Amino acid sequence: MNNHPHYLIGFVATLACLAGVVLGRGALAAPPNADPPCFDNGNRYVDCRNGTVTDTVTGLIWLKRADCLEARDYAAANAQAAALQERRCGLRDGSSKGDWRLPTDAEWRATLGPLGGLGSTPFVGVQAAPYWSVTTNVDRPDTAWVADLQMGAVLTEGKTSLHFGWPVRGHLTASTMPVSQSAAIRAEVNTGLALATPVQTVVTEYFLDQGTVPANRAAVGLEDTISGPYVQSVEIVNGRIDILYGNGANAQIAGRVLSLTLYSDGATITWRCGNGPEPSSTRVSAPNITDVDNLYLPAQCQP
C-alpha cells in the first residue's frame, strides 16, 4: 500500500508525457494560417515580402510570380492552383493546399485594366499571353474565360487549350468592386463605339447620296463581319447601327445592344447615341433599341 503513491505518480507522469507528444504532433499537423493582406500608404499593389502581392483596391492576394505555373489545359491549371502552398513558387506565407485558386472572370476584369502599367508593380514573370480564369462560359460549357494580357481583354477559349495559371487568395472587396467594375464596363462599351465610327461614316454618305437609309451592311458594301474584343457584331438595320456586345464582354453587357440612330432636318444629319438626348430633327432610321443599362453607357449616350 505504501508504494501505490509512487506508482500513481509514475502513471500520471507517463500520461502527461504522452499527452505532450500527442499535443505536439497535433500542433505540427495542424495547417498553418495563411498570412493576411498587407498595405502601405502609396501603392495599389503592395509586395508583402512573402511571395504574395496584395491588390488594395480589390482585396485580392496574388501570387507574386506570374510565371511559376506551367501552361496547362483548364482542368490541369485549376488543379495546379489548388495544390499551391508554402515553399512553392517562392511562397513564405503559411498557405496550404486549397488556399489558392484561379481568379474568376469578374476578378480578372476588375484587375486587367490597371495591370496595363506592369512596369510599376511588384509582380514578376508576367507573360504577354492568356491566363485562365476559373469561370466556365455558361453558353458554351466546353470553354472558359481567359484574360489575354497582350490584348487587354477577357475572352473565351476551349478548355483543352494550353494557357498559364496565376493564382489568387481571398475575394473581391464588395465596397470597391462596383466602382471599378462599372468603369471597366464603360471602357468595354467604348470599344464598340470605336468599331462603329467608320460604319457611321458610310451610312451618312449613303444617306446624303441616296436620300434614304441603307437596309443593311451589304447595301453599303460592308460584307465582312465587324467584331472585336467585347463586341460580337456591328450591324445596320434600316439605317440604325446596332452594336452587339460579346467576345469576352462583362456579363452585365454581354448579349446587349447599343444603338446609334440617325436624324435629319433635310440639310444636316445628327447621330443619337443610345438613350442620349433626342435631336429636334426627324428620325430617319429604325428606332433605338438600346438595352445596355444607362450605368454602363458613356455620358453622351445617357438620358
Image (tube, grey):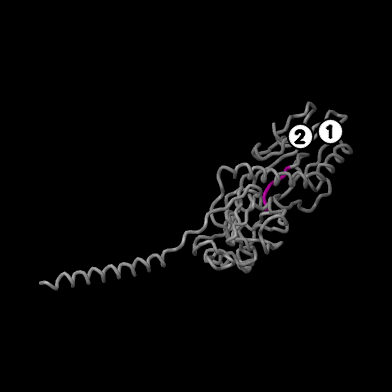
Q: Residue at x 30, y 70 (%)?
A: 17
Point out the image quarter for the C terminus.
top right
Report the front residue among 248 and 185. 185
- Residue labelled with disc 1: 269
Q: Which quadrant: the N terminus?
A: bottom left
Q: Residue at x 14, y 73 (%)?
A: 3
Q: Residue furthest right?
A: 209
Q: Residues within 10 Å of mark 1 (few under 14, many from 20)?
A: some
**Closer-to-camera residue (12/299):** 12
Amino acid found under the numbered disc labelled 2: Arg
Figure check: 115 above or below 71: above
Is 75 on the left or on the right of 265, as rendered?
A: left
The image shows residue 43 at horizontal and vertical percentages of: 66, 50
- Mark 2 and mark 1 residues within 8 Å of each other at the beta carbon: no
Residue at the image point whose x is 54% and y is 65% from the top: 84
Q: Main secondary structure of the magenta part?
A: strand
Give the labeled residue for mark 2.
272
Residue 22 coordinates in the image, percent (x, y): 33, 68
- Tell me, for residue 160, which label it has, or none: none
**Residue 181, x across and y down, in percent:** 63, 45
> Over which residues does the magenta segment extend?
242-247
